[in-house]
Amino acid sequence: MATPQELSDFLKGVDKRAFKRTLYQVRNDEAALDIVQDSMMKLAESYGHKPPEELPLLFFRILSNTTLDWFRSQKVKNAFFASFGDFQSGPDDDEFDILDFCTTENDGSPFENPETANERKQTLQTIEAQLLLLPNRQREAFLMRYWEGLDTAETAQAMGCSEGSVKTHCSRAAQALSKALKLKGFRS
C-alpha cells in the first residue's frame, strides 16, 4: 500500500511529463492542465491505496481515459455549438514551445554557441511539428513507449489495447517520423 508520501512523490515526479504528453494530444494548455489534474485526483481518490509499483500504469491508464473523455466532450460541444459560432471561444494565441521544457546539458560554460542553440531549436521545433501530425493513437503509443519508457505490455495496459496494437502504432509512428524528418534533411 502506497503511503501518502509515496503517492505525493510519484505525482510530483510525473506531473511535467504527463502535462507535455497531454499537451501534445489536446494542443491546449488549459485543457492539458485540467486533464492532468483530474487524472491525478482520480488516482489519489480511487487508487491511492494501491502499492507504489502499480501507480504508474494506473495513472497512465487514467490519463488516457481522461484525455479520451475530453475529446468526446469536445466533439459533443462542437456539434452542439456548430451553428452558434459567436459563442465558441477563439483559439489560444499561446503556442506550446517545447524549448520551454527542455534543458540543455551543462558543459561548464554559462553560454551556448548561438549557432548550436539555433540548430537545436530548429530541430526540436521540427520534431514537435511532426509529432503533432501523427494520429492520436500513434502519438500516444509512441510517447508512452519512448518518452515515458513504458514497455509494450505496460503501454498496452495503459492504452486499453493489445500489445500487437501498441507495436503497430509505435512502428507506424516511428516510420512516419523518420520519413518526415528525412524529407526535411535530417539523417538517421
Image (spheres, rainbow, N blue to C red):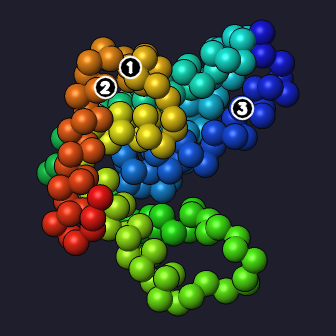
Residue at the spot x=16%, y=66% of the render?
183
Q: CA distance from mark 2 to mark 3?
A: 25 Å
- For marks 2 and 1 on the same chain, the one whose residue lies earlier in the sequence: 1
Q: Residues within 10 Å of mark 3 (few under 14, many from 20)?
A: some
Relative depth, front residue between 19 and 128: 128
Q: Where 33 sits versus 56, above or below?
A: below
Instruction: Determine whether label 2 and label 1 are within 8 Å by CB.
Output: yes
Q: Measuring from the top left, give residue 62's x and y in whole percent.
A: 50, 24
Q: Where 149 sits versus 109, above or below?
A: above
Relative depth, front residue between 14 and 108: 108
At label 1, which amino acid type do we have?
Ala
Pointer 1 residue? 156
For mark 3, give the secondary structure: helix
- For marks 2 and 3 on the same chain, the one whose residue lies earlier in the sequence: 3
Q: Residues within 10 Å of mark 1 (few under 14, many from 20)?
A: many
Q: Is residue 159 visible?
A: yes
Quarter of the C terminus within the rendering? bottom left
Q: CA distance from mark 2 to mark 1?
A: 6 Å
At label 3, which amino acid type do we have?
Phe
Relative depth, front residue between 12 and 169: 169
Q: CA distance from mark 3 to mark 1?
A: 21 Å
Quarter of the N terminus within the rendering? top right
Q: Quadrant of residue 165?
A: top left
Pointer 2 residue? 166
Q: Residues within 10 Å of mark 2 (few under 14, many from 20)?
A: many
At label 2, which amino acid type do we have?
Val
